[in-house]
Amino acid sequence: QQPVQSPQAVILREGEDAVINCSSSKALYSVHWYRQKHGEAPIFLMILLKGGEQKGHDKISASFNEKKQQSSLYLTASQLSYSGTYFCGTDQSSSNTGKLIFGQGTTLQVKP
Amino acid sequence: NAGVTQTPKFQVLKTGQSMTLQCAQDMNHEYMSWYRQDPGMGLRLIHYSVGAGITDQGEVPNGYNVSRSTTEDFPLRLLSAAPSQTSVYFCASGQGRNNSPLHFGNGTRLTVT
């Protein structure tokens, strides 16, 4: 079942922070985050596994609350290069195949 | 190392025509999958494969067929194209575990008139 992302779109000024949420009605075994620039393929950002972990990559970090079946992506001090559409991909199966169900995406625009 | 290669990049079909979208990866990945991307709908899983000879349906499989005769290739067939299949199609591969990322091809933009 497709997870729900919120907000659908956000506009920021450089240096501002943003949070993108991903919520599922099914149990999650891992959550992946990807960013897609217009006309390009999605690019991997990070993976979070069960265990409530948080991961970080430069000024982009994420958390995963398996009990609430939710993940959040945190973009700190946003840069122009952060603009794009962000997708969460969720593993909803215990069979550990790598199969991902993606959310509908959140479009982020960072302005100078 | 080319990664995931999709062909063609663009295609225009008439309603009722059939075609095959090609996907090949050179990373020896066991897992391969096809997604379609439509505005506001995100990436929706069409079919996936966990290894040669093994395929399964995703969220939106109707109107599409797949086969996986080799580890490297995972073609997607449209049997009788419909305007509702106008979309951007992405192939993705991975090591087949929930702790490994997916690698996406550059996509095929398909228009059905």
Image (tube, helix red, strand yellow):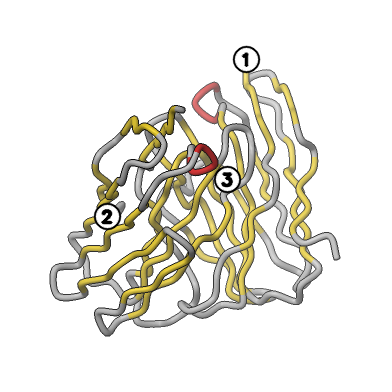
Q: Is residue B92 left or right of residue A92?
A: right
Mark 2–mark 3 Cα distance, whole angstroms, equals: 29 Å
Q: On the same chain: label 1 and label 2?
A: no
**What amino acid type is highlighted by mark number 1?**
Thr
Q: Secondary structure at mark 1?
A: loop
Q: In the figure, is residue B23 to the left or right of A111?
A: right
Give residue A22's mark.
Answer: 2
Q: Position of residue B9 (x, y in %)?
A: 76, 35
Q: Position of residue B75 (x, y in %)?
A: 72, 53
Q: Residue at x 47, y 32 (%)?
A: B38
Disc 2 marks a residue whose amino acid type is Cys
Instruction: Give the residue displayed 67% in from the left and 45% down from the top.
Output: B77
Report the residue marked by disc 3: B64
As drawn, is B83 to the left or to the right of A89?
right
CA separation in Å, label 1 and label 2: 35 Å
The residue that label 1 is drawn on is: B113
